[in-house]
Image (tube, helix red, strand yellow):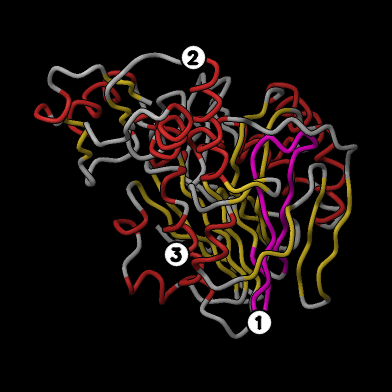
Amino acid sequence: MIRGDGRLNHDLLPGEKGPQDQCGVFGVWAPGEEVSKLTYFGLYALQHRGQESAGIATSDGKKLLVYKDMGLVSQVFSESALESLVGHVAIGHTRYSTTGSSSWRNAQPTLGKTASGTVALGHNGNLTNTAELLEILRANYPEQSDNEITGGNTTDTAVLTALLAGNPDNSLENTALELLPKVKGAFSLVFMDEQTLYAARDPQGVRPLVLGRLKRGWVVASETAALDIVGASFVREVEPGELIAIDENGLRAKHFAKTKRAGCVFEYVYLARPDTSINGRNVYDARVEMGRTLAKEYPVEADLVIPTPESGTPAAIGYSQESGIPYGHGLVKNAYVGRTFIEPSQTIRQLGIRLKLNPLREVIKGKRIIVV
């Protein structure tokens, strides 16, 4: 649904605590470009990071609009929907909920009404002090708390949005610089008001976030692969503990906390695309090296090495190369089934695995198999 009034158009589910989101985020500031379509393609490139819902917010400098719904990127956005999302700045989000709370009400970007306009936010990560942030919200901005966080329902992203929107005496940029040092946990954020695109990353750099350059603008995204898809050149990572603001005056970068790098290894193992680079290292190469290391540390006698597609394929190749055991395919993947790890419940994951993978019995029958 498109909403231009700036109010949060979803309730917040009760009792959501702990890890919630491992998602994909994308943002673009590019006057003269079709930013909604660039964001659509960027989210398409990040579909693997979240398959439950997708959303895009845009602004033409005067009015901020958002369109979001449940489903894959290709299912959510029609050509007419993208045409209606006009502007020069946009953010987008694909969502995966680890707690099983899969609902339209939790689709992002979230919206908050500020004293001067609107803020929209997309979040990849898990905050660990949501209750503390909610108390800050209630103590300092009771109107935001009453209007946006109702019935005792809380999610970390909604609380963060309300806090960013709550200070009537400060700019959004200054509010973010004051707020982000108080936020604990993992967060890679894209957010915007009517004029400016923002990106921020937690001091540990748990989740990836990168900056890219277009001929007439800038792009931020969860992975470098999304930059490639929209024709942006990689500039650098958004540094841990850094806030970036992009508007007609250019790009401003400020650090809000000291860096304590602690990136999540699961990005290399599973979450990220193999054609992405994180912290200067290509994910495909890292997975091949993991397979080689596995073969050195756990050598076994076998007839065939097979991967669990797709993320296991490079590691299986590495295992085969190091061990000298032949590499082959013993599992057939149904390309129309999503990533089973990021399904919203264990029962659905188990059913999804049965549907997703089927053995090539003629290939593996009677053989000693290493499955990577």
Report helix, strand or loop for mark 2.
Answer: loop
- Give the residue type at disc 1: Lys
Range of residues picked out in magenta: 196-219
Which quadrant of the view contains residue 199? Answer: bottom right
Q: Please name the residue that numbered disc 2 is placed on.
A: 298
Nearer the observer, disc 3 or disc 1? 1
Which quadrant of the view contains residue 154? Answer: top right
36 or 242: nearer the viewer: 242
Quarter of the image for the C terminus: give it: top left
Please name the residue shown 20% across and 37% down the image: 332
**Drawn side of residue 349 relative to residue 32, left or right:** left
Please name the residue shown 66% across and 82% down the image: 216
Give the Cα separation between the discs numbered 2 and 3. 43 Å
- Give the residue type at disc 3: Tyr
| First along the sequence among labels 1 and 2 | 1
| First along the sequence among labels 3 and 1 | 3
Nearer the observer, disc 1 or disc 2? 2
Q: Residue furthest front?
A: 324
Q: Please name the residue that numbered disc 1 is placed on.
A: 215
Q: Please name the residue that numbered disc 3 is placed on.
A: 40
